[in-house]
Image (cartoon, rainbow, N blue to C red):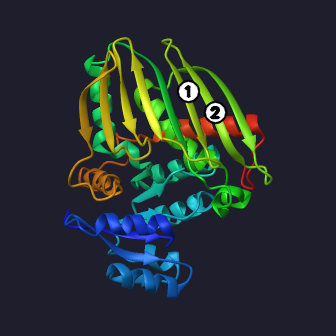
Amino acid sequence: MKTLRVGIIGAGWIAHKMAQALGPVDWAEVYAIASRDQKKADEFAAEYGIKKAYGSYESMVEDEAVDLVYVATPHSHHYQHARLAIEHGKPVLVEKAFTANLREAEELMRLAQEKKVFITEAIWTRYMPLSHKVKELMESGVIGEPRVLTATLCYMMEHKERIVNPELCGGALLDLGVYVLNFARMYFGTDIVRTVTNCHLGPSGMDMMESISLSFADGRMANLQSGALTLNDRQGIISGTEGYIRVDNVNCPERIEVWRNYEMVQCIERPADMVNGYEYQVRECKRCLEEGLLESPMMPHEETLSIMAQMDALRKEWGVRYPMD
């Protein structure tokens, strides 16, 4: 495939991140932007030199030149916009969290399979080189036997509409908690035998701060925290019998440190040619499309569905509901 032509649905802040990521690369481009507001689409296109600006999502997915659709709308709209792309035969990269709930995710996966259309979740950490390096280091034995994992991700977001509004699938879990859950599953696997949680609900009934403790069949444990009421260090630490691995920023790894006997023995910085990290998931989509794959092995459909089921169970325990549940 020549240059991958990406069409973005939604012109919000995360769409800007994607446009910035693909601007410097020569193997992909943001070819089209679609917004419900033609003026907003035109302004977005002018800012990034994008060829096509559409005032409706339907018009963009009907453009035969679009090779990949990136869904960059709120969680609440992922299902309908990804479905629109699939129905038009367009490969689609769906921003995390994949959908509002497991039911929507299963319907999208079934439809994509029926239409033989590629679809994957844009949980960007799954595709980053440093994320893969953490796994390599952990399995090398440098820290001995890994036994405990901790991960935290909190931002001050208590007044953001997408966090407090149930109509937009608000709360910290789908926005931030999904990252710490992915961090735990990437390195400790999915054989979870016990889950213990605590959650603080905000005035609108959305989860604003949560702690999640996972026990795995092999005896390992993961302690996770996410929330929209504080700032924190965003660190992930994998502790073993002979040392630990510290990851700076669990949702966008910037630096990995390897410690043995409380002395740092290795430090790995993010790749020098990294733009902002969003480019890696698009590169993986391009590879999959060139190889005729319908899912990415970096984020298999089964894993996306399993995480949606896990988050559904957490929300049920906390009493957090969305209109589409």
* Numbered disc 1: secondary structure: strand
Q: Amino acid at mark 2?
A: Ser
Residue 95 seen in render: yes
Is the C-beta separation of discs 2 and 1 under 8 Å?
Answer: yes
Position of residue 25 measured from the top left corner of the image (x, y, whole percent): 22, 65
Quadrant showing the N terminus: bottom left
- Looking at the image, how many numbered discs can be counted on the residues? 2
Measuring 47% from the left and 82% from the top, which residue is drawn there?
41
> Viewed as shown, does residue 287 lie left or right of 222?
left
Judged left or right of residue 258, residue 198 is right
Q: Residue furthest front?
A: 263
Secondary structure type for disc 2: strand
Give the CA distance from mark 2 to mark 1.
7 Å
Numbered circle sitting on residue 8: none
Image position, residue 225 (x, y; %): 58, 35
Tag 1: amino acid: Asn
Tell me: residue 313, above or below residue 121. above
For the question of whether residue 62 can be seen, the reply is no
Residue 223 bears which disc, if any?
Answer: 1
Q: Position of residue 287 (x, y in %)?
A: 25, 52
The structure residue drawn at horizontal position 70% and vertical position 32%, both measured from the top left corner, is 198
- Residue at 76% x, 49% y is 202
Near mark 1 (Cα within 10 A), the count class, few <14, some 14-19 or many ≥20, is many
Please say if 34 is above or below 275: below
x%, y% of residue 65?
A: 32, 75
Q: Residues within 10 Å of mark 2 (few under 14, many from 20)?
A: some
State the mark number for residue 211: 2
Sequence order check: which comes first, mark 2 or mark 1? 2
